[in-house]
Amino acid sequence: MQKDRKIVIASGNAGKIREIAEIFSEYEVVGCNSAGFTDEIEETGKTFYENAYIKADTVCKALNLPALADDSGLCVDTLGGAPGIYSARYAGDGKDESNINKLLSVMKNEKNRSAKFVCHLVLRYPDGRTLDAAGETYGEILSEKRGDGGFGYDPVFFSNDLKKSFGEASEREKNSVSHRARALFKLKEKLDSKE
C-alpha cells in the first residue's frame, strides 16, 4: 500500500503536535490550523473514541487529507471514571487550576486514590479507512500539587512508572510513559504493518 505521507493533526495544541511529529518522524505532520482548518469542533461523543473520531472525521472531510485526532483525559477509580471525557471542562471554566482544585476538593477524604490517564487516537483517511489505538498510564491522585511542569492535572498525578508526579517530570520522562505516547506507538505499529 502506498504510504500517505502527510497527516493533519486535528488540534491547535503546539505541544501535542510536536509530540506526534517526533514519534511520526517519517511523515509530514502539520497542525490543522496550518493546513487551513480553524473551525471549532463540538465534541458530542460519549467516549474518548467517539470524540477522537468526530474530530478526525471532520478535519479529514474538510481538507481531504488524512487526519489524526486524539481525545484523552483523567479517569479516577473512586469517582467512577470521572472526570473522564469531561477532564478539560471539569470545573466549568476550562482552566487547569480550577479543574485541579475541584478534583482535590472532591478527593479530600478518599482513601482509594488510584487513577489513570487514557488516550484514544483515530486516524481517518479520505477513502474511508480508519485506524485507531488507545493508551493508558497508571498512578494516583496526590493530596496537593507537586512540581509546576506539564499541563492539566500533571502536578497532582503521581506516576507509578516514574515514581513522581507528571508535574515534576521532564517532558522526555513524561513522554516515555504517557498515555498519548503509548497510543501513538501502537498506532505507528499498525501503520507500519500496513505498508
Image (cartoon, rainbow, N blue to C red):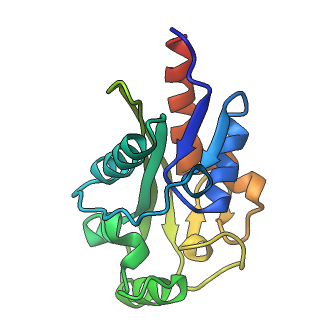
Residue at coordinates 56% horizontally, 23% vertically from top-left? 4
Up/down of 24 relative to 174, above or below: above
168 lies left or right of 152: right
Residue lying at 35% horizontally and 86% vertically, measured from the top left: 92
The picture places residue 26, in percent across and down from the top left corner, at: 71, 27
Please state if 87 lies on the left or on the right of 163 as rendered.
Answer: left
Q: Quadrant of residue 61?
A: top left
Residue 72: percent from the left, percent from the top? Answer: 43, 57
Which residue occupies the foreground of this view, 188 or 144? 188
Image quadrant assignment for residue 122: top left
Q: Is residue 19 visible?
A: yes
* Residue in the picture at 62% in, 76% down: 155
Q: Please state the horizontal and vertical placement of residue 114, each as a whole percent of the image.
A: 42, 64
Indicate left or right for 78 with 149 as reference. Answer: left
Q: Percent from the top left, x then y, of residue 171?
A: 75, 58
- Against 127, is 158 above or below? below
Q: Nearer the viewer, residue 58 or 94?
A: 58
